Image (cartoon, rainbow, N blue to C red):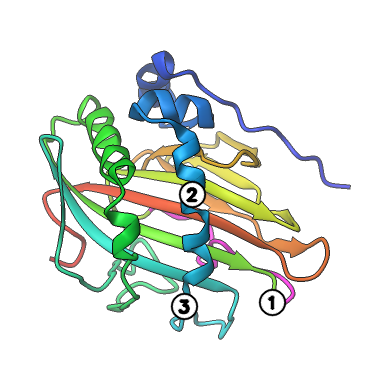
Amino acid sequence: MVASFAAPSTPVEALLPRLRARGYAVVSAADVGALCGLDVRALEAWHGSWDDLAIDGYLKDAGKYRRRRHSCFTVDAGVVLQAPHRAHWQSLDYNALHGGMHRWFEPIRAELVAQPAWARLLSSLARLFSQLRDVQKWYVEAHQFRIDTSDGIGRPTPEGAHRDGVDFVAVFLVGREAIKGGETRVFQADGPDGQRFTLLEPWSLLLLDDARVIHESTPVQPLHGIGHRDTLVLTYRAGGFQGD
């Protein structure tokens, strides 16, 4: 029997010290609302958007378990602008499995991006990260993911424990349905320490300093029928998008 560990939530007022000290933090859904100045219940209306994701055709294991959409934005002094649609690119240094490819995904639906809460979410996190790095303009890639169990198991991170090649990563758990597994594991990039826990609360948030930690999520398995795990991943990078 495998033990399951609760996510170690950090209150908003302790986020900056925690991120400076450990390089990662978990934020509860209620504190996401406080951090971003919005009613987190408004985000519940976004769930249906994850029912409309296309299969990721780039998986080298030929799996059909990952669906996604991808769009890019800039956040400059709090102003959020959508960038022209572009491929997602990572170097082989950061993604040995799927790096080195220009991967084109369908963009995030315009009706989701037009929600006032969308811009507030992106700009609030940019403001937080600017307190950790002296950066005013952030280049943000947004990924909607659904990992399902149509192949028997689904792999949230088929590349294994990794960094993303950015400055900061924000992983929102949107929801889990009829699955077990999907444990998050965060490790020091240059040391032996690590922590494991499972995000269970919808719209709880994992924040990562990408230079200091590596991360992965374990496979998900069905409890019955075909289950899934939905996430929204936002990456923040100074100086430009990867591949520029």
**For this view, does 113 lie left or right of residue 28?**
left
> Residue under circle 1?
150
Q: What residue is shown at x 62% (from left), y 38% (from top)?
A: 201
- Amino acid under disc 1: Ser
Give the quadrant of residue 78: top left
Give the residues drawn in magenta, as a range.
150-163
Q: Which mark is residue 56?
A: 3
Q: Which mark is residue 45?
A: 2
Give the quadrant of residue 189: top left
Quadrant the C terminus occupies: bottom left
- Amino acid under disc 3: Asp
Give the dominant element type of the magenta stretch: helix, strand or loop: loop
Q: Residue 38 at x, y = what percent?
A: 37, 30
Q: SS at mark 1?
A: loop
Q: What residue is shown at x 81% (from left), y 40% (from top)?
A: 3
Q: Residue 26 at x, y = what percent?
A: 51, 31
Q: Nearer the viewer, mark 2 or mark 1?
A: 2
**For this view, does 218 lie left or right of residue 20?**
right
Of the pair 193 and 184, the residue shown nearer to us = 184
Pointer 2 or 1: first along the chain:
2
- Amino acid under disc 2: Ala
Position of 208 relative to 88 (above/below): above
* Distance between the alpha carbons at the discs numbered 1 and 3: 13 Å
Position of 119 relative to 102 (above/below): above
